[in-house]
Image (spheres, helix red, strand yellow):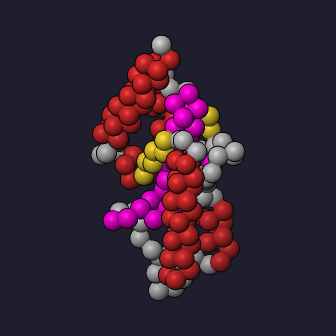
């Protein structure tokens, strides 16, 4: 199947895809900030430049798009019919880099949390936020325990 857009239109569309400050990222940031959690954004000194970094808890959070990061068994992670082999190679390489960065961070003593874009869709968002709050609240309680 041929691309429905000409090269110029496709190039423009792809140039509009953001890697920072995406809608899912902003949703998570607003939620965590409203719950009292403070973070750094896109720390370039850490492998993979995590979306959110919580130095106090030695925890990083990645908010991954299902398509771009190849979320397994997700309806939002389908490979385009056009240039299928190219897309498979690109997404496979991204998944490999994600795994390598997570491993490096863990070896450095960081806790790595990953949220997928599909988990932030309106039907699943509340459950995702509840789970995220529980996880961070546990981190906060452990931090308080060790600090005292």
Give x and y (percent) for residue 16.
Answer: 63, 58
Is 7 left or right of 52, judged from the image as shown? right
Q: Residue at x 45, y 74 (%)?
A: 79
Residue placed most toward the observer, 147 or 28: 147
Asked if one can make out residue 132 in the rendered structure from this viewpoint, the answer is yes
Q: Residue furthest top?
A: 148
Instruction: Find the magenta span and give its range.
Output: 49-73
**Residue beneath the point at 31% across and 45% down:** 124
What count of labels does the image hold?
0
Q: Is residue 69 found inside the magenta-colored segment of the image? A: yes
Left or right: 92 in relation to 45: left
- Along the line of sight, which residue is nearer the eye, 114 or 86? 114
Q: Position of residue 122 (x, y in %)?
A: 34, 44
Q: Quick check: is 66 in the magenta stretch?
A: yes
Q: Residue at x 47, y 86 (%)?
A: 1
Seen in the picture, residue 68 relative to 144 is either above or below; the reply is below
> Viewed as shown, does residue 31 lie left or right of 21?
left
Q: At which x and y percent is residue 105? A: 56, 48
Of residue 47 and residue 20, the one placed in the foreground of this image is 47
Is residue 57 depicted above or below 42 in this figure? above
Q: Is residue 33 visible?
A: no
**Picture quarter containing residue 71?**
bottom left
Residue closest to the far bottom = 1
Residue found at x 48% / y 13%? 148
Q: Where residue 143 sits in the image (x, y, percent)?
A: 47, 23
């Amino acid at each position: 199947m041929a691309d429905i857009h000409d090269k110029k239109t496709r190039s423009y569309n792809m140039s509009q895809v953001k890697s920072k400050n995406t809608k899912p990222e902003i949703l998570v940031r607003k939620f965590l900030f409203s719950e009292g959690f403070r973070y750094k954004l896109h720390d370039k000194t850490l492998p993979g430049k995590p979306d959110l970094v919580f130095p106090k808890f030695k925890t990083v959070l990645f908010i991954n798009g299902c398509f771009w990061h190849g979320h397994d068994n997700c309806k939002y992670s389908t490979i385009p019919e056009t240039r299928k082999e190219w897309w498979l190679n690109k997404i496979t390489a991204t998944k490999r880099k994600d795994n390598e960065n997570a491993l490096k961070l863990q070896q450095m003593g960081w806790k790595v949390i990953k949220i997928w874009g599909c988990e932030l869709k309106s039907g699943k968002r509340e459950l995702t936020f509840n789970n995220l709050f529980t996880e961070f609240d546990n981190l906060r309680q452990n931090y308080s325990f060790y600090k005292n």
